[in-house]
Image (tube, grey):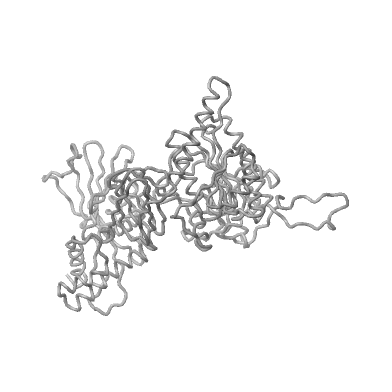
Amino acid sequence: MNTASLVRSLTRVALRSTNVVKMVSPRHFSQTAKVMSVTPELQQALNREIEAEQQLSKDNLQGAVAPTFPGFAVTTKEAEVRLTKKNGNEDILVVFNVNHSVDMDEGFDDEPSQAVAPVPVALPPFTVEITKGDQRLCFHLELVPVDDQPDEYDFRVEEFYVAPSANNGNEDVPSEVYASSGKYIDPDLHDLLFVRYLEERGLDARFCKTLVAYATHYEHSQYMSEEQVQEFKLKENCELRFAAGEDSDVCLELVNGYAEIFGTQLILNKKYIFPAKSRVAVFTFTSATIELVGATESAYVAETTPMIIYLNIHAAMEEVRKKREEQAFNTSNKPKGPRLLLVGPTDVGKSTVSRILCNYSVRQGRSPIFVELDVGQNNISVPGTVAAVLVQKTADVVDSFERNSPLVYNFGHTSPSKNLSLYEALFKQLASTINSQIQENDEAKIGGMIINTCGWVDGEGYKCIVKAASAFEVDVVIVLDHERLYSDLSKELPEFVRLTHVPKSGGVEQRTTQIRAKMRGENVHRYFYGTRSNNLYPFTFDVPFDDVTLCKVGAEQLPDSCLPFGMEVENHETKVVVMEPSVDIKHHLFAFSRSQKPDETVLKEAVHGFCLVTEVDMEKRTMTLLCPQNTIPSKTLVYSEVTHLDDQIKR
């Protein structure tokens, strides 16, 4: 064992033996080493070991949790990881253990002067058991790096045997079962017998790469997690607010009691992983004990929150629903639920309140329609859209609401000010479509609407709020943290509209322009690639210019002097014009219109979805698209000013 390997063992012993203090920081390792009176060489190697672990979090893990194994269910117990899936009439089990899976001999030389700590990578041996009927075919496999291909891995069969199927959960292999070594099999026969057989069941090079990444993440989390455990005891109506660190995830667990995150109830003892830079608030109506594992920028308990106010708003909405149901009882009329509009400047928590109210409605057994009019930070679709979705499940604690079958209209800009006429036309069309569709859906009709708006509340932005209230026929308006807006709306809106002013939560933080841009990029990325818990796999393919028609909404305004006598000026902001393909469309989003041709019907039709132009070849007259499906659903593509630089495409 060289110095580095010894250091890794010592740091683990030092970490696990320091139980007097629950939170142990890596910087305290050097103090522990001094107490142990280690040699200067060992001290330097110890520091390099710590640097390697921190480097892993910052540069290699990049704040992400372990990747998922498509098709496999993953369970963990301490250092052991088990993957299971069905393959026809076969049951496939993969088992590995991350203990001693990091080989530091490869990474460190024995020179204390080595400047850069290598990133430790876990290469655990793993077992594959394929059970069919009363037999199981078992393989013991080793992970091996692929020559001249960094970060690529393959497997080598070390041993194989046929054993009886596991009986009543007993997976032990009888001692009389004969095991054959894979080392003495001809390489060609090895590939034919084993590699191809396992690849057909999804155990291929891609699986190996995922396993290495997962094991590296998981081994690291097992190694380092103890030093960042925080426990919080919340009293009645208190809220834990925390911000995940810049480069690391935070694992949250409800240890006892009751708690919720933005209206979604937490499951006792379930671990929730929040990515780096997440801002989270955990509220309890009774009491709760919360445990956080991982680095946080901040974490504190607030005793003053507006959650009771939000609950009262929900209760008032439910009271309206029940009253209207009673009034419609024994009549042919289908009752219409309350329609609530949330307004206020930027960074006051409108999206969060929308999420809370939707979740409370679902938990009440209702199915509200969530309407998103914020084209800059859209919570339903990509930026530059107005959209609506029927909410039938509470939002995922980490990923928020599912985005199944939304109704989406392409605006193409991240601020209404870019094209006010178009913005107004689209939200009016959205309201009209919703009103038409809910006539066939009684649950959606009584569920009502919860409508989120953008943070533009002055001048033309204020006029948009008033017009939106009229278009969606709202009967409740919640003003967040803006007394003048509340006063102005109280004079402008009809008397039947119930207007309420609500303070913003103390946990709301101001977002810079850079943060907003980053959030838009993450939103586009989610559209194409999904989330950690629900990966999506988009397609990349070339499309000839001649196979599609590109268009955009909005044209240059002609001066009156250029118009023929007697002709009126048409609204240039809502005019649909054809675009010629050029390199300028690279990295832009395009909407697949349901319209068959580029005319005014583009404004009236919801879109099929979106694609991203990743390359433009003017010589070949083709463009490369990143697309959720492997074919284009429409030949009419509508331009969006929203851009995204996709760094995951591999051609």
Residue at the image position 23 percent from the left and 69 percent from the top: 29
Q: Report the front residue among 620 and 66.
A: 66
Counting from the top left corner in percent of width and height, residue 603 is at 66, 45
Q: Is residue 338 visible?
A: yes
Residue at the image position 49 percent from the left and 36 percent from the top: 316
Counting from the top left corner in percent of width and height, residue 203 is at 32, 50
Describe residue 169's horizontal placement relative to residue 276 as left or right.
Answer: left
Q: Is residue 528 visible?
A: no
Quadrant of the rendered image containing residue 621: bottom right
Counting from the top left corner in percent of width and height, residue 549 is at 66, 51
* Residue 335 to residue 522: above or below: above
Q: Report the front residue among 84 and 409.
A: 409
* Residue 42 to residue 490: above or below: below
* Residue 611 to residue 473: above or below: below
- Looking at the image, the residue that sits furthest to the left is 176
- Looking at the image, the residue that sits furthest to the top is 330
